[in-house]
Image (cartoon, rainbow, N blue to C red):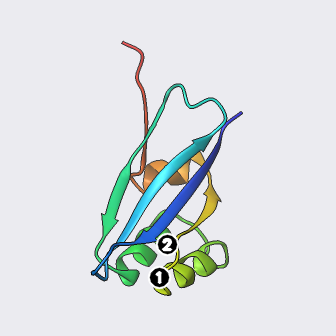
Amino acid sequence: MQTFFFHLRPQSHSAAFIAACSVLGKPEGFHGFERTFTGRNDVIAALDAAGISRNRYSDTVDAVGSGLDSCFEISINEAQKLDVLRLDSPE
């Protein structure tokens, strides 16, 4: 069973936020990658659009706004909606 995490960190010398998905457990079949958000409002809009409630992400966004790295657990569907995870297709 895999667990997915949405990692968020500030970009140096910028208002941008860098997001990535990591997979805990067997990562086979999943490809997590980074995505850049232009700022706090951009990342909040994406999280809201993915259907993630503010009470789940507010501490993480606040921490990153203060210059810290932070993360929270997300579902596979939320990771895909946030465009930080792709499923490897068997070909």
Q: Judge whether residue 54 can be spotted in this image.
A: no
Q: Residue under circle 2?
A: 48
Relative to 1, residue 64 above or below: below
Q: Quadrant of the N terminus?
A: top right
Task: Residue 61: give x, y in percent of width and height.
Answer: 52, 79
Question: Disc 1 designates what residue?
Answer: 67
Give the residue at x 42% y 16%: 90
| Residue sitting at x 59%, y 64% | 71
Is residue 89 in view?
yes
Label 1 crowd bin: few (<14), some (14–19), many (20+), radius 10 Å? some
Q: Position of residue 20 (x, y in %)?
A: 44, 55
* Within-10-Å neighbours for mark 2: few <14, some 14–19, many 20+: few
Name the secondary structure under disc 2.
helix
Asked whether the residues under the numbered discs 2 and 1 touch, taking CB atoms below 8 Å apart as contact, a structural biologist would say: no
Q: Quick check: 14 left or right of 30? A: left
Residue 46's x, y, as percent? Answer: 41, 69
